[in-house]
Image: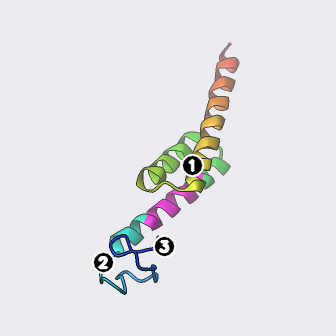
Amino acid sequence: MKRCPVCRARFSGKPVCRRCKSDLFSLIQLEEQVKKSLHRAVYALAAGNIDTACNFCGYAESIKKTSFGKALSGFLASRQDAHRAAKIVKLQ
């Protein structure tokens, strides 16, 4: 978060806006959840768990759209398609 969503003052990193005194704690927590979910998605991908990575990334993107989340989501979709295609070929 770069600005307070209420008064648009620059975000100071504190849970209360310096200008309008809005409580930003819940928004800060949500942004932390997004970061953690994207990190978990990357770790799951590195471990070869594409479906788990997709779930974590999808959760993060449902809370807040980010450029990294969008790129990761696109990459995971392509990997998931390739993984499914390899399974089909293997079954034949």
19 left or right of 88 in image: left
Q: Is residue 81 left or right of residue 55?
A: right
Report the span colored magenta.
31-41
Q: Secondary structure at mark 1?
A: helix
Q: Are marks 3 and 2 in contact (CB under 8 Å)?
A: no
Q: Residue furthest bottom?
A: 18
What residue type is disc 1 on?
A: Lys
Mark 1 and mark 3 residues within 8 Å of each other at the beta carbon: no
Residue 36 in the image: above or below residue 88: below
Name the residue carrying label 2. 23
User: Which image quadrant for residue 83?
Assistant: top right
Image mark for residue 70: 1
Q: Is residue 38 magenta?
A: yes
Q: Nearer the viewer, residue 59 or 87?
A: 59
Q: Residue 6's x, y, as percent? A: 32, 72
Tell me the crowding category of disc 2: few under 14, some 14 to 19, or many 20 or more residues within 10 angstroms, Cα based.
Answer: some
- Give the main secondary structure of the magenta stretch: helix
Q: Is residue 60 above or below residue 73?
A: below
Q: Nearer the viewer, residue 49 or 85?
A: 85
Q: CA distance from mark 3 to mark 2?
A: 15 Å
The amino acid marked with disc number 2 is Asp
Q: Position of residue 38 (x, y in %)?
A: 55, 56
Between label 1 and label 3, give the one nearer the viewer.
3
User: Which structural element holds mark 2?
Assistant: loop
Marks 1 and 3, the one that precedes in the sequence? 3
In the rendered image, residue 30 lying in the magenta stretch gets the answer: no
Disc ID at residue 2:
3
Indicate which disc, 3 or 2, sits on the residue closer to the N terminus: 3
**Residue that appears at 47% across and 54% down:** 60
